[in-house]
Image (cartoon, rainbow, N blue to C red):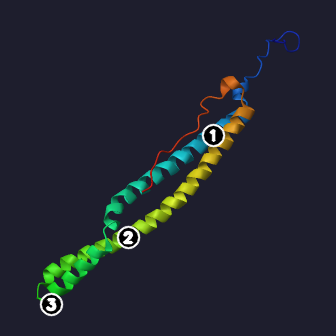
Amino acid sequence: MVIPVDGGGPPVPPPNPCNAPTCLDAKAELASARTAFASTCNGLKTVAAILRVLKPIVSISLWYLLVIIVVAIVLLWLGLGWISVILWALVLAYVLAWILYLVFARVAGSMAQDLAARMKDVQDAIAKVVAQCPANCRGDLSIPTCDVQIP
């Protein structure tokens, strides 16, 4: 119902509940939480891709590495140092892959914890939107997902 102001002026329209500051703030918080979740998910996908590249290298048996080292030493004694250098480069690449794999595995673990925290932030923001906004003003309340497999 519209009530005229001061008896003769134009009627004042009722405020739109969808534009209430509390509703707009809750929606902005939800959008921010979704963006943070998506950013963390994309970072975790990148780290998982790096781990997938390193996994076959670090899966090589240690016996193969020992054979390469022995062959490199024998070739060095036989005067074939240039082949020995190539074999030592392979050993170095293997060691470097292991170091990188361990570092990125720790990063992936940390990012997985951050992703769980971001998911909680999204869920809390959804609860605020439900509490602060009428049903016709809420918009998308779906919970985002992050499909990533860490090797």
Q: CA distance from mark 2 to mark 1?
A: 40 Å
Please state, as top left, top right, bottom left or bottom right, where the N terminus lies in the image. Answer: top right
Q: How dense is the environment of label 3, judged by Cα within 10 Å: few (below 14), some, or many (20 and up)?
A: few
Mark 3 belongs to which amino acid?
Answer: Trp
Mark 2, secondary structure of its residue: helix
Q: Earlier in the sequence, mark 3 or mark 1?
A: 1
The residue drawn where x is 56% and y is 51% is 115
Q: Residues within 10 Å of mark 2 (few under 14, many from 20)?
A: some
Q: Is residue 150 left or right of residue 65?
A: right
**Mark number for residue 77?**
3
Where does label 1 land, which residue?
30
Return the x and y of residue 132 as percentages of the image width and height.
74, 33
Give the quadrant of residue 50: bottom left
Q: Which residue is mark 2?
A: 98
- The picture places residue 145, in percent across and down from the top left corner, at 53, 42
Please tell me whether mark 3 sits on a helix, a strand or a loop: helix
Mark sitting earlier along the chain (2/3): 3
| Residue 6 screen position, x and y as percent | 88, 14
Which numbered tag is attached to residue 147? none
Q: Amino acid at mark 2?
A: Trp
Residue at the far bottom: name it. Answer: 77
Residues at discs 2 and 3 in contact (Cβ within 8 Å)? no
Looking at the picture, does residue 93 appear above or below residue 50?
below
